[in-house]
Image: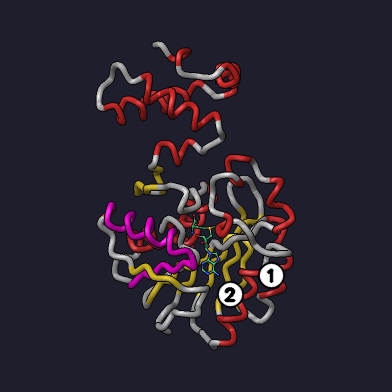
Amino acid sequence: MKLHVWLTWKNKVNIRNIPEYELARLREKAKEINGSPTDYENEYSTLLTRRLNHEPLQYIEEFVPFYTIQLKVDQRCLIPRPETEYLIELIKENTEPSKGILDIGTGSGCIALMMKVLFPDVEVSGIDISQEALSIAIENAQLNSIPVNFYQSDLLENVKTKSVDLIIANLPYIPQDNLDDLDKEVIDYEPLIALNGGVDGLEIISRLIQQIESNDLTNLTLCLEIDSTKSKQTLDLLADWKDVKLLKDLAERDRYVFATR
Ligand SMILES: C[S@@+](CC[C@H](N)C(=O)[O-])C[C@H]1O[C@@H](n2cnc3c(N)ncnc32)[C@H](O)[C@@H]1O
């Protein structure tokens, strides 16, 4: 392969930092783009340069597996994390929605789409403030032939229906002062609106809890994915709720809060 012709000297040195399994996946993607298993050096060097510039492998590959489905991902949405796949498992084990499910901050649509797979008889909606995220969530619904209603809303602002008995929210929770500490893969490529949780990281989550309370929504379960360092403050925000549970991820970190009202 005449790869050395295409890469800069700096990139030729840095290529050693990319694990072999990633190089193998980039080669496979290059073959797919090229449409042939040979003579794909141009495509491979372009993809390699993107990866050397810290673009996440998932954006380069364009698709990620999520629980039982495949999702398209690009810079319009956050890359779904394994912790969120585990949230799906916990929801499956701990909740029994029958009226309606609302996924707030849907991003790629991963949670909303999996909810419809797991609870096919329940109406599922996914909302996001970002029109760009919604456009990819809609593509993912079509790709997987899963009927979910996606629309734009700032938290509950445009949400009309009151017949919801399960609200799931994986909202941005990184304190704005910590954003600069994130890996380049994250801060240079993933949407800021999916990461920035305001001054204390809890601005958006606490606004959602206030909206649910002031709209007097009852007979529902709220499932939140949170930053493990914010569990105490999150439990404080839910002081007036019932059956409040703090659940751990597979690394034993406090990552989810379930509560009913
Ligand atoms: C951490 S990402 C989660 C995306 C997806 N649910 C997942 O688990 O991969 C947070 C999402 O919340 C959306 N978001 C941020 N502020 C919002 C708001 N005020 N109302 C609705 N969605 C919001 C972002 O656009 C982003 O898609």
Whether ligand 1 has any atom under 8 Å from the Cβ at mark 2 is answered as: yes
Residue 142 numbered tag: none
* Of the pair 148 and 30, the residue shown nearer to us: 30
Identify the residue shown where x is 44% and y is 59%. 133
Q: Helix or strand or loop: what does disc 2 sit on?
A: helix
Residue type beneath disc 2: Leu
User: Was residue 13 drawn as part of the magenta stretch in this picture?
Assistant: no
Q: Which residues are magenta?
A: 123-143
Residue 41 vs residue 196: left or right?
Answer: left
- Whole-percent x and y of residue 14? 59, 21
Q: Is residue 188 above or below residue 112?
A: above
Vertical placement of 6 versus 96: above or below?
Answer: above
Q: Residue at x 69, y 78 (%)?
A: 239
Q: Quadrant of the N terminus?
A: top left
In contact (CB < 8 Å): disc 1 and disc 2:
no
Figure quadrant of residue 228: bottom right
Q: Tell me the tag on residue 235.
A: 1
Looking at the picture, which amino acid does disc 1 mark?
Answer: Leu
- Residue receiving disc 2: 208
Q: Position of residue 39 (x, y in %)?
A: 30, 16
